[in-house]
Image (cartoon, rainbow, N blue to C red):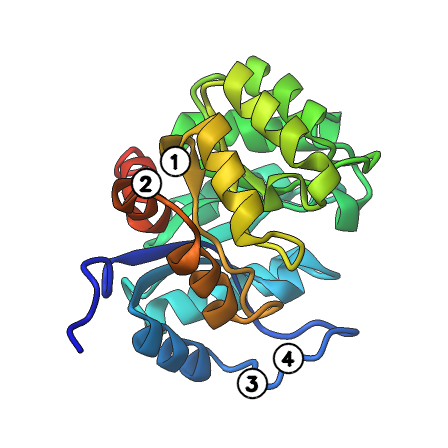
């Protein structure tokens, strides 16, 4: 059987390296992840390091740089910004100048800081100056990362491509996430999450448009194969599927170069 047209072109917009203290990750090695990418036809994965998302942004970002050097082109990096680190802005400026780093990763729920709060403001300003993408965890009903907080920061920083991780996370929040994307031209919905189904995905495409959405797997938290299969098997127009799998993210990444 011939490979489908998208095979070998897929860009995963939301991945991770490393492990997590209370989450079962069978193989946390980058070698294992690249092997799965090869089998699935994923050309590139945009990643942050889980140590950085969690307790130590400085150390996690250093591990990220090492993996980017090991796998040039296969991994592109999101530097984690810790809103509680007084030296965070200076470190972020340096990281965004490093080869392979294309954006900023924010996790308001882990950091316990609202996305539109003062601790993240410098990150958005620096991302705008560097033409970088910002990917933030998005969770409907969260006091830190509800979709409406994306609307607030998108209006403040209209030139920054802002990926809403998980598109609101819960099925109850998918409509709210799509509404924000409709209102805010620089907000793009990223679709990973164990609660996302092919049916939900098709509805989001119908409302927000595939050109305002990107594929993400949340590997190594979640299985890349399951996330990709959800998109491949969803009732989507082939052109929309291609936008999700690589078209929209290709456009966003071209803006970082």
Residue denoted by label 3: 27
Q: Are marks 3 and 2 in contact (CB under 8 Å)?
A: no
The answer to whether residue 157 of the structure is visible from this angle is no
Marked residue nearer the N-terminal end (2 or 1): 1
Marked residue nearer the N-terminal end (3 or 2): 3
Residue denoted by label 2: 240
Q: Which mark is residue 25?
A: 4
Residue denoted by label 1: 210
Element assignment for label 3: loop
Label 1, residues with CA under 10 Å away: few <14, some 14-19, many ≥20: many
Label 3, residues with CA under 10 Å away: few <14, some 14-19, many ≥20: few
Which quarter of the figure is the N terminus placed in? bottom left
Report how far apart the C-alphas of labels 1 and 3 lie in the structure: 32 Å
Q: Nearer the viewer, residue 194 or 15?
A: 194
Marked residue nearer the N-terminal end (2 or 4): 4
Q: Is residue 90 left or right of residue 239?
A: right
Q: Are marks 4 and 3 in contact (CB under 8 Å)?
A: yes
Label 4, residues with CA under 10 Å away: few <14, some 14-19, many ≥20: some
Element assignment for label 4: loop
Q: From the top left corner, tell me how far across and down residue 6 is, in percent.
A: 24, 58
Report how far apart the C-alphas of labels 3 and 2 lie in the structure: 32 Å
């Amino acid at each position: 059987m011939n490979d489908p047209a998208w095979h070998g072109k897929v860009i995963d917009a939301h991945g991770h390296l490393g492990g997590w203290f209370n989450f079962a990750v069978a193989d946390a090695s980058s070698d294992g992840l690249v092997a799965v990418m090869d089998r699935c036809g994923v050309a590139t994965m945009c990643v942050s390091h889980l140590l950085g998302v969690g307790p130590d942004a400085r150390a996690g970002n250093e591990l990220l740089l090492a993996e980017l050097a090991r796998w040039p082109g296969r991994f592109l990096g999101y530097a984690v910004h810790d809103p509680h680190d007084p030296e965070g802005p200076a470190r972020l400026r340096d990281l965004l100048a490093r080869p392979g780093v294309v954006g900023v990763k924010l996790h308001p729920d882990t950091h316990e800081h609202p996305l539109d709060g003062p601790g993240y403001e410098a990150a958005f300003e620096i991302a705008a100056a560097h033409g970088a993408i910002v990917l933030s965890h998005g969770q409907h009903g969260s006091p830190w990362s509800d979709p409406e907080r994306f609307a607030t920061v998108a209006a403040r920083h209209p030139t920054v491509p802002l990926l809403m991780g998980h598109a609101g996370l819960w099925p109850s929040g998918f409509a709210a996430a799509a509404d924000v994307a409709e209102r805010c031209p620089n907000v793009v919905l990223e679709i990973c999450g164990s609660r996302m189904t092919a049916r939900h995905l098709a509805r989001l495409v119908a409302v927000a448009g595939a050109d305002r959405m990107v594929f993400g797997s949340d590997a190594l938290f979640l299985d890349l194969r399951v996330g990709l299969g959800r998109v491949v098997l969803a009732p989507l127009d082939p052109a929309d599927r291609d936008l999700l799998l690589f078209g929209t993210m290709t456009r966003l990444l071209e803006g970082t170069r």
